[in-house]
């Protein structure tokens, strides 16, 4: 029986390994194709439908898109919005999550219901646009941050994590004369780094992928984030107006431009994830253990 279970276990492990390898290849190969295609010559990309390793390396697409500061400006906008938006969102999310995690808060259940209610029903695009317009945020970077500054889903995860912290720590801090803000910033947040890293990554990815808000609220194309510029290049197949923003004298093939911009737009946020991976997994699990 022990030998049968050992053989069965090995067979199970082999099947799992095979399935995971197949899923990994399905997930990774398209990205490898995009990266390789961005470094491929126009002739090879025209004849090969799926490139995993360029026969001849070419940097013409990257030279082209960085020929002016259009891409660099859009990248700067996205980086700035992501940094400022993530810090601001984490600040107000932590304040609200800590308040709702306190069991002695009057009306706690009512506030929790209102938060959950916003996950099911919201005003919609037009009412939100009218609010942003009346607040004078049109064509400003604040319009990319304030309307989505706090996520009910992220707040609930952080609140559940805060509830896992032993109450005895807070009581000890109160005895030592610490107020609520001191408890939050000196005890609760340092003990919640996995959850903080998780929610920060959620917010950072959201702000980095900002697209619809920029389309709705920004009239000046110079303020467009990288995702909107990427849309211009991919959908219009020629990027922004080459005569005005990029070098039109010798443009490389549209397909290589698309792939190069996808790489440029994806790489920065992709580089952050390995540093937060262990906190991300731990925070997501612990934040869901207690309601």
Image (spheres, helix red, strand yellow):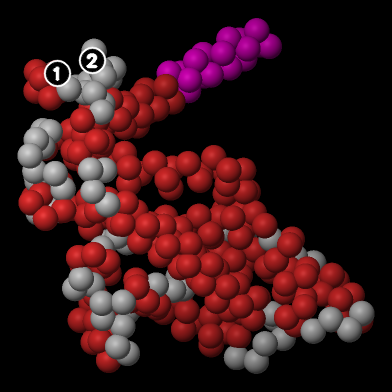
Q: Is residue 3 magenta?
A: yes
State whether residue 27 is above or below residue 243: above
Which residue is outermost to the right? 176
Binning the other alpha carbons within 10 Å of mark 2 as few (below 14), some (14 to 19) or many (20 upward) gives few
2 and 1 marks in contact (CB < 8 Å)? yes
Magenta span has 164? Answer: no
Q: Which residues lie in the magenta part? A: 1-19
The residue indicated by pointer 2 is 56
User: How far apart in space, not on screen, are marks 2 and 1 (Cα)?
Assistant: 8 Å
Q: Is residue 35 above or below residue 180?
A: above
**Disc 1 target residue:** 44
Going from N to C along the chain, the mark reached first, 2 or 1, is 1
Query: Which image quadrant for residue 185?
Result: bottom right
Q: Secondary structure at mark 2?
A: loop
Of residues 147 and 248, the one nearer the viewer is 248
Residue at 58% across / 79% down in the picture?
96
Total of numbered circles in the picture? Answer: 2
């Amino acid at each position: 029986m022990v030998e049968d279970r050992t053989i069965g276990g090995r067979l199970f492990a082999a099947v799992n390994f095979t399935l995971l390898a197949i899923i990994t290849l399905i997930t990774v190969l398209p990205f490898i194709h995009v990266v390789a295609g961005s470094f491929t010559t126009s002739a090879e990309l025209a004849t090969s439908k799926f490139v995993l390793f360029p026969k001849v390396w070419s940097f013409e697409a990257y030279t082209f898109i960085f020929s002016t500061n259009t891409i660099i400006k859009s990248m700067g906008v996205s980086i700035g919005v992501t940094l400022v938006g993530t810090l601001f969102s984490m600040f107000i999310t932590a304040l609200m999550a800590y308040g709702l995690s306190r069991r002695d808060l009057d009306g706690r259940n009512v506030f929790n219901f209102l938060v959950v209610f916003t996950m099911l029903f919201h005003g919609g695009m037009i009412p939100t646009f009218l609010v942003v317009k009346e607040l004078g945020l049109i064509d400003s970077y604040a319009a990319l941050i304030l309307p989505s500054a706090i996520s009910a889903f992220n707040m609930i995860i952080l609140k559940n994590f805060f509830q896992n912290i032993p109450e005895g720590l807070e009581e000890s801090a109160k005895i030592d004369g610490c107020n609520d803000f001191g408890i939050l910033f000196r005890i609760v947040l340092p003990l919640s780094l996995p959850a903080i890293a998780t929610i920060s990554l959620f917010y950072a990815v959201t702000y980095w992928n900002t697209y619809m808000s920029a389309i709705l609220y920004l009239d000046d194309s110079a303020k467009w984030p990288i995702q909107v510029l990427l849309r211009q290049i991919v959908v219009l197949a020629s990027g922004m107006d080459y005569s005005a923003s990029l070098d039109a004298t010798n443009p490389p093939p549209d397909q290589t431009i698309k792939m190069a911009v996808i790489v440029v737009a994806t790489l920065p946020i992709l580089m952050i994830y390995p540093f937060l991976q262990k906190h991300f997994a731990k925070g997501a699990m612990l934040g869901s253990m207690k309601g």
